[in-house]
Image: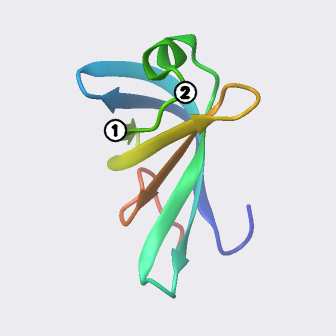
Amino acid sequence: MSAHEDGYSGPARLVIGHEVFDVQVELRGHFEPIDGRYHWYGRIAKSDALAAVLRGLKTAGNIHTPHGNSQCEVAEPDTWDRYRITGYSTPPFQLEG
């Protein structure tokens, strides 16, 4: 992680509709001066339960960590079945500085 990025790595709870998934996440973020918003993003570790529900499709959800929660978008999985997760504004982790 660079000096200009914040992040979180660890357990999280992902809520999609009425489904709840306990997952492991790797999240990073930065303030984007062009649009004036904080952008955060990362990957969700492989989860067979999540894959069975999403089947490779994109969806909206809410991610909860010990530091906060935020609305998010869960997108296509990579080659290792890790889904990408993105969000804007308040991240689900503490910001440095």
Residue 9 versus residue 97: which sits nearer the camera?
9
Crowding around mark 2 (Cα neighbors within 10 Å: few <14, some 14 to 19, many 20+) is: some
Residue 79 spot, x, y in % from top left: 76, 30
Name the quadrant of the N terminus: bottom right
Residue 10 spot, x, y in % from top left: 58, 35
Residue 5 spot, x, y in % from top left: 64, 67
Residue 36 placement: quadrant: bottom left
Q: Could you tell me which residue is drawn at 37 percent across and 38 percent down? A: 64
Identify the residue position indicated by label 2 in the image. Answer: 56
Residue 61's disc number: 1
Evaluate whether residue 86 shows in this view.
yes
Residue 29 versus residue 57: which sits nearer the camera?
57
Q: Is residue 71 above or below residue 11?
A: below
Residue type for callout 2? Gly
Evaluate whether residue 67 shows in this view.
no
Q: Could you tell me which residue is drawn at 75 percent across and 26 percent down? A: 80
Q: Could you tell me which residue is drawn at 46 percent across and 32 percent down? A: 12
Q: Is residue 77 above or below residue 84?
A: above
Residue 46 versus residue 24: which sits nearer the camera?
46
Q: Is residue 59 above or below residue 39?
A: above
